[in-house]
Structure formats: C-alpha cells, structure tokens
Image: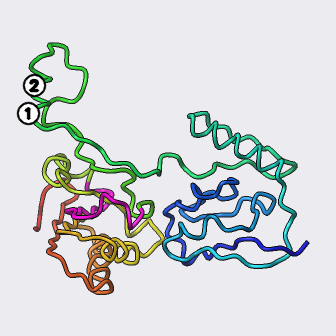
Amino acid sequence: MKRKIITIHEDKCNGCGLCVNACHEGALTMEDGKAKLISDIYCDGLGDCLPECPTGAIEIIEREAEEYDEDAVKKRIEEREALTRGHCHTAPSNGGHSGQHMGCPGSRARVMNRRSASDALADTASSKAETGPAAGNESQLGQWPCQIKLVHPAAPYFNNAHLLVAADCTAFAYADIHKDFMKNKITIIGCPKLDDVDYSEKLALILANNDIRSITVLRMEVPCCSGIVHAVKNAMMSSGKMVPWNVVTISTDGNIVES
C-alpha cells in the first residue's frame, strides 16, 4: 500500500539518537552511528521524531510501505520498557522482522556530580577500609556520553563550558589525563582516522548552540591526529565563533611534547 512514512537521510544524520527516544512506537534504532528505520510496520507516519532531529535528517514521504501494525508496536513497546529496566530483550517479536535494540540506553545524556576534593579527603580519613578511588584519583568526566558522534550539540552541559576535545588514544598514553586535562572541563573524544565522519560539523553545531569559554585540543603526535585539530579550526570558522583555544600534543610514550 502507498502511505506516508518517514525517511532518514544518512548524510545529514549526526548520530545523536534523539529520534530513537522520541519515537513512541520504537520504530527507530541506531546502527553504525546512524538512525535507522527498523521496519515499516512500526512507523505510523505521524513524525513525532521530526522535531527532535537537530540536523533535519528525517522527513515524511509517501511511498509503497507495509501497513502500520499496532499489535507489533505494542510488543515493541514492551521490549523497550524491558530494556529500560535493564533487561536486554532483543528477541524477534514479529513475523520475520528481527527485534533489534531500540538504540543504546548508555548514550542518554547525563551530568556527573563530582565531589569536592575536601569531601573526598574527609571520606578517606573517616574510613580505614578504602573501597573506592583514592582522593585525587577520582574520575573527572563531567558528562555522558563523551564520544563526539554521540553527544547532542544542544546538551545543557555544553553551555559556558571549557571544552576538551581529545583524541581517543591520549587517555591511554597520558597517565594523568583526568587530573591535568579533564578536570573542570566537558570532555568529548574521537579518532579522526577510524571514525568515518567529519567532526567539524558537529563541533560547529556545539559552538553555535552554546557559549563555549575555551577549547583544549589533546592530540597524539602521530600525523593522522592532525584531523582533530583541523576539525576544531574549521568548526570555529564555519560557526563564526572564535574562542580561546590551544593544542597539546602527547607522544606515543606518554609525554607532553608540545603545548
């Protein structure tokens, strides 16, 4: 039958996942960092997902499509509720259509409330049996998610933030990255060599939607890591927002070689 149904333009999709949560029927999922329509039978064509898409990657078209199946949707919603409770229920729920994840619950945005150093020291002093990280060694990650491909450019934690844009490998090469670079910053990470995406577009949206106070780029000394520096430069130019920024280079043996 010919009816109205959504279509997703992958070239515009930034992988934020907001449409997955907005779809009440569970018709969408994330695959390889892009939103996907799982099956025609789950999409009612009303477009609840459209207003949530920050890049205009979703539109309603009219085409030949399977009929909307309300019973299948009810089963899909039950799977979503089970997934939210932590039960990873992904078994097939309809004739021949595989039941895939509704999008990763771990990509939902959240802000970390970090304790002050004085509180951490007081806790350590009051307990002989230390069961958590020692004072001064606690994680300094300020938000979740932290992958550039997954963060939403209008997430509230970006506003008035000092931004750390770090290449993935820097966290493994430089031992004190939390204390020396991540503390009091919003950290986003990526690999310009392995991620098949242009970071400059997402970074430009972050700059355009927020008042970013500064940007620190943390890269490895290897040549391919220059891509993350270029992405930040291009983002500032295309957004028209030039903010104070600096680049710190980490050697493969874990030392700062340039800052």
As helix, strand or loop, the secondary structure at mark 2 comes to: helix
Image quarter of residue 227: bottom left
| Horizontal relation, residue 52 to residue 8: left or right | left
Residue type (three-letter) at the residue carrying disc 2: Ala
Residue at image point 57% right, 39% down: 84
- Residue in the foreground of this view, choosing between 148 and 220: 148
Q: Is residue 177 above or below residue 83?
A: below
- Graded by Cα atoms within 10 Å as few (under 14), some (14 to 19) or many (20 or more), the crowding at tag 1 reads few
Q: Is the residue under label 1 in contact with that under label 2 (CB below 8 Å)?
A: yes
Q: Is residue 153 above or below residue 99?
A: below
Image quarter of residue 213: bottom left
Image quarter of residue 218: bottom left
- Residue in the foreground of this view, choosing between 186 and 149: 186
Give percent across and percent down for residue 150.
Answer: 45, 60
| Horizontal relation, residue 59 to residue 5: left or right | left
Q: Is residue 120 magenta?
A: no
Residue 118, numbered circle: 1
Residue at image point 15% right, 15% down: 127
Image quarter of the N terminus: bottom right
Residue type (three-letter) at the residue carrying disc 1: Ser
Q: Is residue 70 above or below residue 249?
A: above
Q: Please give the count of numbered marks on the rendered protein.
A: 2
| Horizontal relation, residue 11 to residue 193: left or right | right
Q: Which residue is mark 2?
A: 122
Q: Which residues are magenta?
A: 152-170
Give percent across and percent down for residue 30.
Answer: 59, 58
Outermost residue to the right: 1
Residue at image point 54% right, 49% down: 104
Image quarter of the C terminus: bottom left
Give percent across and percent down for residue 65.
Answer: 84, 70
Residue at image point 25% right, 20% down: 131
| Horizontal relation, residue 212 to residue 33: left or right | left
